Amino acid sequence: MWKYKESIISEITEMPDGVFGFVYEVKHLPTNKKYVGRKQLLSNITKSLTKKELSELTDKRASKKKKVQKESDWKSYYGSHSEIKSLIKDGKVSEFERTIIDFAYSPKHLTYLETKYLFSLGVLENSHLYFNDNILGKFFRKDIPVK
């Protein structure tokens, strides 16, 4: 279950039209620590053609694979941070609250929004408040001088 403003979102159809993904915040209730990240709603995968599809090919040089779009694991996703993954694996799902911060309408928009929120919230400077330890794989908590 994801929260967005005053709503509960459990299906893609409950999101605005044309949404590509969203920026989210996962909060660990016992520690009040948060993780800010992004999630795509759909992913493109390459599948091999079935035997029936292969038999229907007229051009034998044609690709034996097809691109298929499928829904991502956004409904059960809690983030990519190892500490969060470990807690979820230990069955502590009930200790987390998931909130959608903003919706994005393209891959670049999603990257922009995530980066904007990560910097504006100061996730690297506030290790006591956030699990995040890097932004874009370029800016790391360990490289930020402690004041």
Image (cartoon, rainbow, N blue to C red):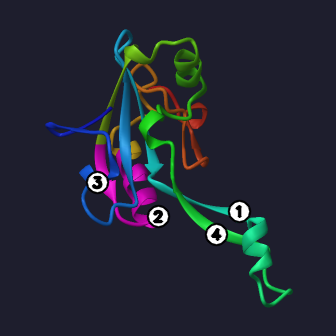
Q: Position of residue 49 (x, y in %)?
A: 74, 68
User: Which mark is nearer the camera, 2 or 1?
Assistant: 1
Question: What's the amino acid at mark 1?
Answer: Lys
Q: CA distance from mark 2 to mark 1?
A: 22 Å
Instruction: Give the quadrant of residue 141.
Output: top right
**Residues drawn in magenta:** 101-117
Question: What's the amino acid at mark 3?
Answer: Thr
Residue at x-position 43% and y-position 51%: 115
Q: Position of residue 131 (x, y in %)?
A: 48, 26
- Label 3 sits on residue: 13
Question: What's the amino acid at mark 2?
Answer: Pro
Instruction: Give the quadrant of residue 130.
Output: top left
- Label 4 sits on residue: 67
Q: CA distance from mark 4 to mark 2?
A: 18 Å
Which element carries disc 2, helix, strand or loop?
helix
Say whether disc 2 or disc 1 marks the residue closer to the N-terminus: 1
Quarter of the figure that contains the N terminus? top left
Closest to the observer, 37 or 89:
89
Say whether disc 3 or disc 4 marks the residue closer to the N-terminus: 3
Residue 140, disc: none
Say whether disc 4 or disc 2 marks the residue closer to the N-terminus: 4
85, above or below 143, in the image: above
- Label 1 sits on residue: 47
- Label 2 sits on residue: 107
Q: CA distance from mark 3 to mark 4?
A: 23 Å
Q: Is residue 97 shown left or right of residue 93?
A: left
